[in-house]
Image (cartoon, grey):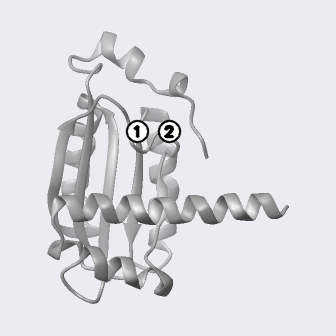
């Protein structure tokens, strides 16, 4: 779902909350809690999309059965508040911040939360960007993580464009 910048709350937030005019990108990894029901992932994604759109947060989530890899962007006070909630969330554990920095332009401005999952056909990208043969973001550097997300995102956008051209 493409979002318009006018929908983002950071413009209004800047007047109310100090630092609201500054945009951060936070990228983190974590282990998926195996005690969660499999349906929990769909619920997490729906909740993230709803909350992120309301709060002017954009991002991408890459996951498999074991790991979360997420990059989110938004007003600094919003991202800081969200990080606190993520740390306390029991649906995942061993959260590690990969990158947190101010940005001039959003990378994920099209999505309140884009969902990507490495598939068998993406195996070559896992091998290209990871230290192992399986997707494990804990073994990836910051630049490898960002290139991996960009590559998966671009592949999915290409597939979506081809599908819409066939209609």
Is residue 38 or residue 116 the one in the foreground? 116
Where is residue 63 drawn, in percent x and y? Answer: 38, 71
Q: Which mark is residue 110?
A: none
- Mark 1 falls on what kind of element? loop
Tag 2 secondary structure: helix
Residue 58, quarter of the rendered image: top left
Residue 35 visible, this angle? no
Percent across and percent down for residue 124 are 39, 83
Question: What's the residue at 50%, 84% (across, down)?
Answer: 121
73 to 89, vertically: above or below = above
Name the residue beneath numbered marker 2: 53
Residue 103 percent coordinates (x, y): 26, 33
Q: Residue at coordinates 39% horizontally, 58% vertically from top-left?
A: 150
Q: Residue furthest top?
A: 15
Q: Nearer the viewer, residue 16 or 162?
A: 162
Say if mark 1 contacts mark 2, CB within 8 Å.
yes
* Residue 57, disc: 1
At 24% from the left and 30% from the top, the residue drawn is 76
Identified at 44% across, 42% down, the residue is: 52
Marks 1/2: CA distance?
6 Å
Residue 92 visible here: yes
Task: Answer left or right for 104 relative to 161.
Answer: left
Q: Residues within 10 Å of mark 2 (few under 14, many from 20)?
A: some
Q: Quadrant of the C terminus?
A: bottom right
Height in image: 120 above or below 137? below
């Amino acid at each position: 779902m493409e979002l318009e910048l006018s929908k983002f709350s950071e413009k209004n937030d800047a007047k109310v909350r100090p630092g609201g005019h500054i945009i951060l990108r936070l990228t983190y990894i974590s282990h998926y809690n195996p005690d969660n029901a499999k349906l929990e992932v769909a619920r997490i994604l729906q909740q993230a999309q709803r909350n992120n759109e309301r709060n002017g947060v954009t991002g991408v989530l890459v996951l498999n059965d074991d790991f979360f890899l997420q990059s989110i962007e938004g007003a600094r006070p919003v991202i800081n508040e969200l990080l606190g909630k993520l740390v306390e969330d029991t649906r995942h554990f061993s959260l590690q911040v990969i990158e947190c920095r101010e940005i001039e332009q959003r990378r994920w401005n099209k999505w309140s939360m884009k969902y990507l999952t490495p598939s068998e056909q993406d195996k070559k990208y896992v091998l290209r960007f990871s230290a192992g043969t399986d997707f494990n973001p804990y073994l990836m550097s910051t630049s490898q993580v960002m290139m991996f997300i960009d590559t998966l995102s671009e592949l999915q956008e290409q597939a979506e464009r081809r599908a819409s051209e066939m209609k």
